[in-house]
Image (cartoon, grey):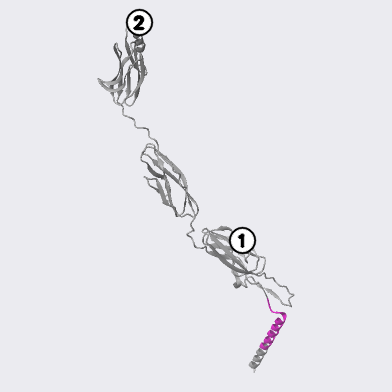
Amino acid sequence: MNFKILSFLVLGIFLLSGISAISVYSDFSDSTQIKTINTGQSVSFNVDFFSMNPPITSMKVGLYSGDNLIQSFLDSNTNSKTYSNTYTYTANTAGTFKIRAIGSDSVNTDSEYLTLVVNSVSPQPPANHAPVITSTAITNVNEGATYNYDVSATDSDGNTLTYSLTQSPSWLSINSATGLISGVAPLVSSDSDYDITVEVSDGTDTDTQSYTLTVSNVLPSSDITPPEITVVSPEDREYDTHTITLRVLTDEPADVTFRLDEGTLIEMNNPSDNLFTYTLTVDNDGDHIITFYAEDNSGNTAREYARFSIEIHESHGGDDGGATTITTPDDFYYQNKYYDQFNSDKVAYTNKTIKTYNLSILVFFYILLAIISLGIIIVVFLLGRNLRK
């Protein structure tokens, strides 16, 4: 039977019998009289005082180890017939304790005891909280300039923080104590991106920040040497055609254009191993000049000139005052021919036909030949005659 109900029954018997009395009752919050907890834990308990002969002159509640008072919860009095309250105790020391409640009125005294057992348990360390990076990364730097980014982080536990770079180019470093990332950006030919990851640790947990750092190309190129242009064709000579093949060689990658006789600028096509070609149709005979332009990747420029002429030679018939045209064999003017070094084709430099002697000169030649022959015959006749004598 519940002790509290039993106390009320006893009190009721005293009331019916006309006897004045005081009654004290106490229990833990789970209605038990004995409780076991660990150090660091808390426990609650209730205390009730009843008197039919108020005032209640003394009400005391305390925690005892043996006869020694460890902690007092109540030491008071009241003019009321009843007094109730709930108390909480947090155990700091292991052992077996008594919670004693004592009440007195003008007639008598009553008391109640609770037993509290406290076991010793090592305190658990508080849960760790990871640090948090709070700064915003600096994501751009000019080539050749010093890059600085001071990483900031907080830790709610107040732990000492350590910084490190888990991904970065070799030209960057970080101060492990302060979080300052620094380094001199390299020279680049165009804007270049680098992946960066910084980590902060409190010894237990970490936080990371990843970002892309762009190194901007702003300085002039260190290459100041212009490209070299070698004109393979046309050669400085006369051509017997209006179709001319242009060939230009550069000593490095470049863009190549040209102008014919200071005309429109034309881009040369499809370079292969820095050899540029273009097939050009020239409308007019005569002397011409081509200006070639080259620009390399660093913006250095160069130009070169080529001169040539075009003369279309036509063969003449027999209506030119009686002159006779003799066509020479193909190898007759061998010394006046050039060879195309790419196609091994012969290129005519002079006309293959010439004009020879007119008819009157030929007649004179034949008459002279007859006179000489006649002279030889006469000499032979005279010599033979002398020999017979």
Q: Position of residue 338 (x, y in %)?
A: 59, 69
Q: Is residue 25 left or right of residue 349?
A: left
User: Which mark lies nearer to you, 2 or 1?
Assistant: 2
Of residues 337 and 141, the one drawn nearer to the viewer in this rendering: 141
Work out whether 42 lies above or below 296. Answer: above
Q: Within the magenta stretch, is there residue 386?
A: no
Of residues 67 and 360, the one drawn nearer to the viewer in this rendering: 67
Looking at the image, can residue 289 be seen?
A: yes
Highlighted range, magenta: 355-376
Q: Amino acid at mark 1?
A: Ile
Quadrant occupied by the C terminus: bottom right
Looking at the image, can residue 172 be seen?
A: no
Say what secondary structure mark 1 lies in: strand
Q: Position of residue 6 (x, y in %)?
A: 35, 10
Q: Name the residue beneath numbered marker 1.
A: 266
Work out whether 250 lies above or below 334. Answer: above
Q: Name the residue beneath numbered marker 2.
A: 16
Say what secondary structure mark 2 lies in: helix
Q: Main secondary structure of the magenta part?
A: helix
Q: Label 2 to label 1, Cα distance in Å?
A: 129 Å
Q: Earlier in the sequence, mark 2 or mark 1?
A: 2
Q: Amino acid at mark 2?
A: Leu
